[in-house]
Image (spheres, rainbow, N blue to C red):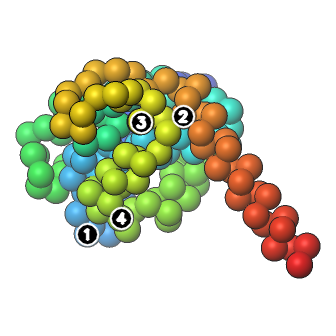
Amino acid sequence: MIDKNKNLTCFDVADYFIWLANETGSFLSNLKLQKLVYYAQSWHLALHEKPLFDDDFEAWIHGPVIPELYKKYQRFQWYPIKEAVTPKLPSDVVAFLQEVADEYFACDGYELEKMTHIEKPWKMARGCLLLDEPSHTIIRKDWIKEYYASRVQEQEENQQEVSSI
């Protein structure tokens, strides 16, 4: 376990998904890892109104990327990340990351990339750039928070409509 008062980093979150891939024998590329870490940050911002970690995502061609995290696993290229890790996270963070995994872990990296490409935060950061044009523009946390909070609100409204039928 990790000290609850210690700030998490994107590497702490990545360790959880790498560990999970090792435990389940799942294919986890750098591309997929970036997107899982992005969705963890996004939903944490929406549900808890604060970031899970301080690192920023950039709007790269293949979706949201934290450059330092990308560099750490770049040597694996498009192959699975094979690294022995033991995540050291508070139990509430583990439970939250498992919820993210339940939703997104079965998707491959390309599916997750396509999903991020149709979502507002990545599109806002990309602006008018061509799809294959490089960018290092930060995807602002307030954009992410606003977009995913609206998705939470939409889901809650849909559930209320269903329960009133």
- Tell me which numbered mark, 3 or 2, is placed earlier along the sequence: 3
Is 145 placed left or right of 89 in the picture? right
User: What residue appears at the point 77 percent right and 57 percent down from the top-left corner?
Assistant: 156
Q: Residue 123, which numbered label?
A: 3
Type of the residue with mark 4: Cys
Separation of residues labelled 1 and 2 (CA atoms): 31 Å
* 10 Å crowding of disc 1: few (<14), some (14-19), many (20+): few
**Picture disc at residue 46:** none
Check disc 4 and report the residue beneath it.
Answer: 107
Image height of 88 relative to 67, above or below: below
Q: Earlier in the sequence, mark 3 or mark 4?
A: 4
Q: Nearer the viewer, mark 2 or mark 4?
A: 2
Rendered-image quadrant of the C terminus: bottom right
Instruction: Give amino acid for label 2.
Output: Ile
Precedes in sequence: disc 4 or disc 1: 1
User: Along the horizontal axis of the image, is 42 left or right of 106?
Assistant: right
Residue depth check, mark 4 versus mark 1: number of the one nearer the observer = 4
CA gap, disc 2 to disc 4?
A: 21 Å
Q: What element carries label 2?
A: helix
Q: How far apart are marks 3 and 4 (CA)?
A: 21 Å
The residue sitting at 42% across, 41% down in the picture is: 38
The image quadrant that residue 132 belongs to is top left
**Residue holding disc 2:** 144
Residue 139 versus residue 69: which sits nearer the camera?
Answer: 139
Contact, mark 3 vs mark 2 (Cβ under 8 Å): no
Instruction: Please name the residue shown 86% across and 73% down the image.
Output: 163
Q: Mark 1 falls on what kind of element?
A: loop
Q: How crowded is mark 2: few (under 14 residues within 10 Å), some or many (20 or more)?
A: many
Q: Residue 25 carries which label?
A: 1
